[in-house]
Image: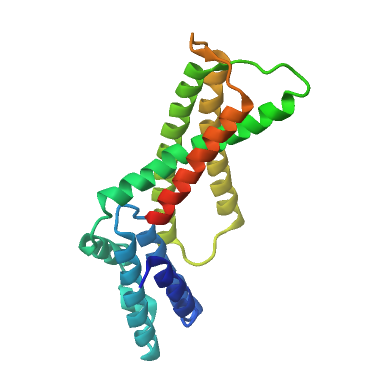
Amino acid sequence: MKTNELIELNNEKRELLTEENKREYEKVLLYLRLEWRLSNHATEELLNDLLDHLLEAQQNGITAEEFFGHDTEGFVKDLIAELPTESRRNTTALLSILTIMPLGFILVVNGLANLITSFFIEPKPVDVGAFVVSYILLITSFLIMLKYVIRYLKKDEMAATGKSSMKKRVLQFIKLYLLSAIVFTLFILPLVFLHTPFVYDIPWYVSMITGGIILIVMYVISKRI
């Protein structure tokens, strides 16, 4: 069975759980799926097997908390230790998507913006050197933020009791907003203040075509993972 089919099957069977059992199971599900270094297919197979056993336990009056034990995080970490890691090919593909696909979006949007503004003002040359520095800072800070968010989600999910206070939700939003603002600022600052000798006239259509090609290639790669 393919990975996407396993995910769909899991979604269907999960609805058979009681609300409490479903909440506990989804803690395990989220924790495992956030472990991006694990084999995606093997993870989904394990999640389905685990769900089958939990459904059977539920019929016998056993709760998910009893099924997983009082240390759910420890239970999940034991599962992680047994799962195979993702292949180097798929890991490289995933990292390529995370680091290169944003470039495609930026180039397409930049080309479209230049096309529209060209009707009103003369196009300005592009400081390629400043853009490269900006993009490196953008991707580096994004990956650091992503690592933090994943770690936070795993910790928060395991500590969740089912209901989050409004204060906690607001604080979570503020933290994410501030992190996003930092990432955006690190991208913009070099574009505004850094000047290099690598300045070129790049037509809007070159930017759009290049960005489009990058997005198509990344889409094809994502379908092969």
Q: Quadrant of residue 110?
A: top right
Tell me the residue at 49%/10% (across/down): 196
Q: Quadrant of residue 118?
A: top right
User: In this rendering, does residue 106 appear at all?
Assistant: no
Residue 87, compared with residue 16, is above or below; it is above
Tell me the residue at 59%/33% (across/down): 208
Quadrant position of the N terminus in the picture? bottom left
Tell me the residue at 57%/28% (across/down): 206
Seen in the image, is 122 located left or right of residue 127?
A: right
Q: In front: 209, or 74? A: 209
Q: Quadrant of residue 69?
A: bottom left
Tell me the residue at 41%/49% (across/down): 221
- The x, y position of residue 157, in whole percent, is 43, 59
- The x, y position of residue 162, in whole percent, is 50, 67
Seen in the image, is 121 located left or right of residue 30?
A: right
- The x, y position of residue 192, in whole percent, is 58, 17
Count the marks. Answer: 0
